[in-house]
Amino acid sequence: MFQHVSYDVQHKILLLTVNHTENNLEQCKLQLLILKRLPEAAVTHSPRLLEMIAEGMNLNPQKYQEMLVEEALPLIYHKTPDLPSHLVCRIFTISLEYYIRQIIEEENKCDASEIWKKIFQVLGLCGKILRWETFLPFNKTWSKNVYWEKLIEIASTSPPGSNQILFYTTTLFIYSLQEYIKNCSARAEDNDVDYVLVEGYRELKLDRSNEPQTMDPPQISVTSNHSKEISKAFVNAAQCWQLLNTEQFQRDFSQLLIKLPLAPWISRFLFDLAVYFGHQEEAKKLMAEMQIKNSLQQNVQLLSLNLIQGVLTMQGFECILKILVDLPTIPGQIIENMTIAGNQRHVLFLPLTQKPIVQYCARAIINSLSRKLFESNVSDLVLGDLLVLSQLDYPRETLLAEQIFSLIRSRGQFCYRLFPNYIVMIDYIEEFMHIWRSHNEEFNFEFSPAQANAATRRIGTRGADKGVREDFKQIIKQQILRANDSIPALVASFIAQERMHLMQTIF
């Protein structure tokens, strides 16, 4: 019978039913029925429906959230109902919470880009109702920087502390944050690889003391295409965070954050932000609140915090030893930009794979030992240790190697009994051969282990016999045969096995 009466009569019957229903949830369902059957009534009845849904959030948040996002809003996307500002803000907050929870809880089951498309759709509806300047639509191929530039353009003509800038910036912040957190773990070599933001290294000036570092914001060194994407997302999130924590937005933004299920993301982001700006003590406090995946990640982060202060400490060295015990099996690739020229701080996203981790640890020790090159009586042991460690990043370590070999030549002799165990880089071996031959085989090298008997003789020809020359040739031949040894494994073994004398030398 209902189907056969006119739409006007249907409308009146449904309205009467709504008015005589005391249950809020039933009233909402009937209002939805009115909008579905009578789309032209959306502008008239949607304000009351949205008010009732907002009120119902106190009774059953999950139910009313779903009703708002999945049923009510799709009916008014192409309408422009007249709604009070506070209700529009409430609608956006409810919708944002619903969608963010969906992204987090269904991380591997849903397409995040489709959810972000819906979030931007809600944002567009709110902006249309409140007559805001239109923000950019969602486009997953656009850089976040495109959105940031548009945001700054809108902010330049908006009143201070406007809800328009608050909601546009919050949306861009969470969008960048979600991409940043997602990209901190990526597939590589059929395995999940985590990326950790760490303090980078600066080149040590071998001819003079280090210049004081500038106070400019650090740069983020790109170590791979993937780290480039992480860096972009992190920087955009950081820009939005700084804007939202200005005096005009801080209170409203803090209240908004409380309602959103972002705690795990925010704790990781704030820790990395503290690392980015070099706030060591703040980062230590934030680390206690952060969900850290494993001991390897934690020790890498602790080493990074140790290096922010500029000099490796005993605590940092102990972190290195723990890291090397816990090395992953995924090889990874040596990183090109771990050390940069100049005196500006830089940070980088370190992949937690074997080679980059060993490289990061070795560089911390190299920087500490290299300072001793300024001393007039630097020992042969320091020179030899530096050669062993520098093999990992050769030929980028050419300047350091040349400095060391220059010192060795000037002395006329060189004692490093660990040579047979750890020097396998063919360029270094050839340089030792060149030194020996250029001095008419009268250069004193002591390479044999001290506990050996006959082999403890100095390798040279100052009053020595033919057997000494043969010892040198035999050691060199042995090292050449090891030229294909894994340098990362060798350097990791060197640090672990020789830790006692390294600690004595460094500290």
Image: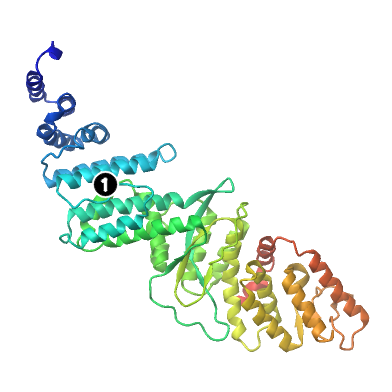
Identity of the residue drawn at 29% across and 46% down: 260
Position of 340 relative to 73 (above/below): below
Q: Quadrant of the N terminus?
A: top left
Looking at the rendered structure, the secondary structure element under dot 1 is helix
In this rendering, the answer to whether 210 lies above or below 114 is below
Q: Position of residue 253 (x, y in %)?
A: 24, 54
* Residue 18 seen in the current view: yes
- For residue 432, which quarter of the picture? bottom right
Q: Residue furthest top?
A: 1
Place of residue 462 in the rendered image (x, y in percent of width and height, measured from the top left): 86, 88
Q: Would residue 289 be seen by someone viewing this image from the given angle?
A: no
Q: How is the image coloured?
A: rainbow
Mark 1 burial class by Cα count in 10 Å: few <14, some 14-19, many 20+: few
In front of the other: 322 or 100: 100
Q: Is residue 344 left or right of residue 466?
A: left
| Left or right: 263, with 302 as reference point | left
**Residue under the image location 70 percent in, 60 percent down:** 486
Residue 137 x/y as whole percent: 28, 47
Which residue occupies 7% across, 18% down? Answer: 9
Where is the C terminus found, in terms of image quarters?
Answer: bottom right
Q: Position of residue 464 (x, y in %)?
A: 90, 85
Label 1 is placed on what type of residue? Lys
Q: Quadrant of residue 396?
A: bottom right
Residue that label 1 marks: 259
From the viewer's side, name the closer residue of 487 and 256. Answer: 487
Residue at the right extreme? 466
Residue 384: quarter of image: bottom right
In the shown orientation, is residue 127 left or right of residue 374?
left
Classify 15 as above or below 486: above
